[in-house]
Image (cartoon, grey):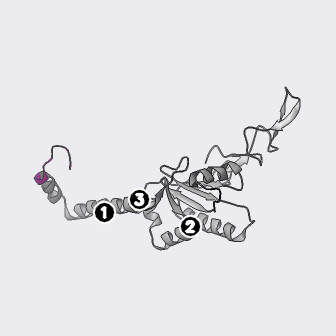
């Protein structure tokens, strides 16, 4: 209710709307309430940068087949909604695995894990179930759309080679006159893409 507006004035305002406008307004309010209620049903755990976005922790390492297949399934489901996704591949950067461990409060973490607007939605089974029930679209409401052509710098991989060490993870320390670990990249000589991450 607007400030200074009595209940009678609000009723008059609603009645004066055409039936189709009234129905659209009521439907929109109902959908927003349903979305908020659905979102609140998930545990609040917000990864860095995940306040109003979709963050997916995955792996591209094929070491454990089931995990790899689950990550691909989740990636495919989330990508089908054409929303901007922050994908954090724990196999490409051990710092991301530590970030996930800290977020979950345990040393044992399993990927994939999906976070939407600062809430833990779950893993592969939960995401597939929400997709089948048609609830993912509601959860993704208000999240920006992704770039249609993919990233021109990394091609969608989300990592690029470090320019400081050219991907070797080592740089020359002139003071010590020896090679030392590069401080700008991860253990694989990669940095997150500055354009899409």
Is label 2 in contact with label 1 (beta carbons under 8 Å)? no
Cα–Cα span, label 2 and label 3: 22 Å
First along the sequence among labels 3 and 1: 1
Of residues 125 and 12, the one nearer the viewer is 125
What span is in magenta? Answer: 1-8
First along the sequence among labels 2 and 1: 1
Q: Under tag 2, what secondary structure?
A: helix
- Is residue 22 visible in the rendered image? The answer is yes
Which mark is drawn over residue 40? 3
Residue indicated by mark 2: 77
Q: Residues within 10 Å of mark 2 (few under 14, many from 20)?
A: some
Left or right of 65? Residue 56 is left
Cα–Cα span, label 2 and label 1: 26 Å
Residue 22, compared with residue 96, is above or below; it is below
Q: Residue furthest top?
A: 175
Picture coordinates of residue 65 (x, y %)?
72, 70
Residue pictured at 33% horizontal, 60% vertical:
33
The residue mark sitting in front, 2 or 3, is 3
Left or right of 137? Residue 2 is left
Picture coordinates of residue 11 (x, y %)?
14, 56
Residue indicated by mark 1: 30
């Amino acid at each position: 209710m607007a400030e200074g507006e009595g209940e009678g004035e609000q009723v008059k305002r609603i009645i004066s709307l055409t039936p189709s406008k009234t129905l659209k307004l009521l439907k929109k309010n109902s959908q927003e309430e349903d979305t908020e209620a659905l979102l609140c049903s998930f545990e609040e755990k917000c990864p860095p940068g995940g306040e109003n976005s979709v963050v997916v922790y995955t792996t591209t390492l094929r070491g454990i087949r089931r995990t790899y297949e689950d990550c691909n399934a989740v990636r495919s489901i989330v990508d089908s909604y054409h929303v901007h996704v922050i994908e954090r591949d724990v196999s490409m950067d051990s710092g991301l695995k530590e970030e996930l461990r800290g977020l979950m409060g345990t040393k044992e973490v399993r990927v994939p894990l999906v976070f939407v607007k600062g809430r833990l939605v779950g893993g592969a089974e939960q995401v597939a179930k929400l997709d089948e029930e048609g609830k993912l679209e509601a959860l993704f409401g208000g999240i920006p759309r992704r770039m249609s052509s993919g990233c021109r710098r990394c091609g969608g991989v989300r990592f690029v080679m470090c320019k400081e060490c050219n991907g070797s993870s080592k740089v020359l320390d002139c003071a010590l006159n020896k090679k030392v670990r590069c401080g700008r990249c991860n253990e694989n000589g990669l940095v997150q893409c500055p354009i899409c991450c």
